[in-house]
Amino acid sequence: MLPIVKRAMISKNEAVFQASLESLRKIENMFGNAALDKCLGSFVEALEKHPGGDARIIEVLGVLKSLCSSEASVILQRRFPRQVA
C-alpha cells in the first residue's frame, strides 16, 4: 500500500492522485481498516518527507484518518496536528 501513497504524493497528475486515494478506499473496503493500520508507520514516514503546507498531504491524511481505526486516527492527529482536523 505504501507505493499507492507515494504515487499520490509525487504525481503532478490530479487523476493519478485521485485514483491513488480511491485505491486506498477500495483496499479498506475489501480488507478492513486493520490492513491500513498495519501500514500506518510506513505511511507516516512517507508523509513526513513532504512539506506540511502541501494540500495533497492534507487530503491524503484526511482519507487515511477516515479509513483507519479510531486508534490509528489518533496517532495521525498527534503526528500531524496542523494537517489533520
Image (cartoon, helix red, strand yellow):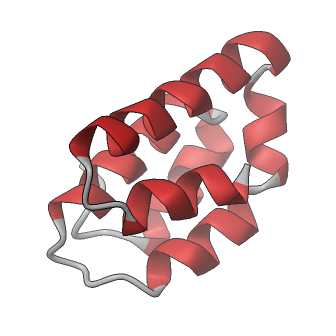
Q: Nearer the viewer, residue 56 or 69?
A: 56
Examine the rendered structure and indicate whether residue 81 appears above or below residue 66: below
Q: Residue 23's image quarter?
A: top right
Examine the rendered structure and indicate whether residue 11 appears above or below residue 31: below
Residue 28, position in %: x, y? Answer: 69, 23
Q: Residue at x 64, y 48 (%)?
A: 72
Q: Residue 55's image quarter?
A: bottom left
Q: Is residue 16 left or right of residue 72?
A: left
Examine the rendered structure and indicate whether residue 31 appears above or below residue 72: above
Q: Is residue 8 left or right of residue 41?
A: left
What residue occupies the far top of the structure in this picture? Answer: 29
Q: Residue at x 73, y 41 (%)?
A: 36
Q: Residue at x 73, y 48 (%)?
A: 1
Residue 61, position in %: x, y? Answer: 40, 52
Examine the rendered structure and indicate whether residue 19 appears above or below residue 48: above
Residue 83, position in %: x, y? Answer: 25, 63
